[in-house]
Image (cartoon, rainbow, N blue to C red):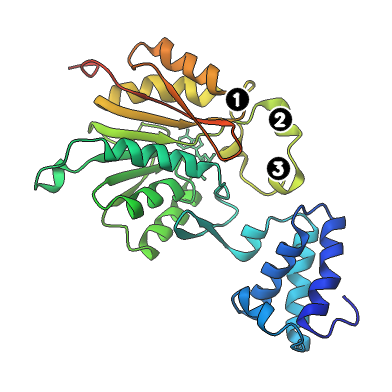
Amino acid sequence: MAGATSVGDALRAAAPRLRASGSRSPRLDAELLLASALGVPRAELFREPARALQPDEVARFEDLLGRRVAREPVAYILGRRAFRTIDLEVTPDVLIPRPETETLVEVALEALAAMPIAGPDPEDEPLALDVGTGSGCVALALATEDPFVRLVAADIDPGALAVARRNGSRLDLARRVEFVLSDLFADVGERPFDLIVSNPPYIPADEYVALEPNVRDYEPRLALYGGIDGLDFYRRLIPGAALLLRPGGTLALEVGAGQADDVAGVIDAAGAYESPERRSDLSGVPRVVFARRRGPRAGD
Ligand SMILES: C[S@@+](CC[C@H](N)C(=O)[O-])C[C@H]1O[C@@H](n2cnc3c(N)ncnc32)[C@H](O)[C@@H]1O
């Protein structure tokens, strides 16, 4: 970035370096990193493109650029990611929330809205479980957008759970979201849930080795790898959820591209759910498979 003297110059010099390193959004990345280096909102860059950068600002920007050129995701460099209406802390312990996961939140909100109105007792309010909560994005978006739902947010990874818990406290949602360290359902308690949501690890073995370096080398394998065919978690989650859902309660699962029919097949095979439905994301990819629990709960 030799000779960069102004905000505009710095951005113009950085974008080609980022593009050459494989970034698909070099200009946006440069703007986000420069805004972070200057400690200002991104919009501020456009107000004063001729503002001269101080040497310490240039040094900070160079440091962030170097990390990005090495393919570190922007969200980890900034330590933040927006998801629906909330802003979340993210660290390398958690998957960076993806836009397609917003479809899972939409399906879950619709399922909650269709539930009978709760009585005056807080215990009557709907109870939802988020399995593999990661940053807490799904659970915390649900708690933000539905003022009544109470949630249990579970993850097997203590580092991820610590991030989710901090996000819950910062968003002032800790009263309605309980964070639990648990291998799937092992430690979530015996209580019946009205809704179970999950965006489980679903990348199959052949796709995992071919992932782009910014994902494979930085995001947690535990959050991504779903076994040889990518379906390991669905085979455990779907029968397990049937034991914890109330009759009429909804199971909603995010799936990878091309997995919807297989996951619907696992739901059918469990014999405990009504016919599964599918919902596509904004790219038209079937992204969420969901079904209502039928009959009395097993063990009743
Ligand atoms: C694909 S990430 C989803 C994270 C977050 N819900 C999201 O949508 O961004 C899957 C999450 O499942 C967690 N996980 C993996 N195996 C698990 C298990 N056996 N029990 C509970 N959580 C698990 C991972 O730690 C990771 O946080």
Point out the tag, 3 or 1, that comes first from the N-terminus: 3
Quarter of the image with the C terminus is: top left
Q: Residue 244, image x and y in percent?
A: 28, 27
| Label 2, ligand 1: CB separation under 8 Å | no
Give how far apart the Cα atoms at labels 3 and 1 are: 15 Å
Q: Residues within 10 Å of mark 2 (few under 14, many from 20)?
A: some
Q: Callout 1, which amino acid? A: Gly
Residue 186 lies left or right of residue 78; in this view the side is: left
SS class of the residue under badge 3?
helix
Point out the tag, 2 or 1, that comes first from the N-terminus: 2
Whether pointer 2 and pointer 1 mark residues with C-beta atoms closer than 8 Å, the reply is: yes
Q: Callout 2, which amino acid? A: Glu
Point out the tag, 2 or 3, that comes first from the N-terminus: 2
Q: Nearer the viewer, residue 262 or 56?
A: 262
**Residue 216 numbered mark, or none:** 3
**Residue 207 numbered mark, or none:** 2
In the displayed structure, 155 sits above or below 288; it is below
Q: Name which residue lies at 54% across and 18% down.
A: 261
Whether pointer 2 and pointer 3 mark residues with C-beta atoms closer than 8 Å, the reply is: no
Give how far apart the Cα atoms at labels 2 and 3 are: 10 Å
Q: Callout 3, which amino acid? A: Arg
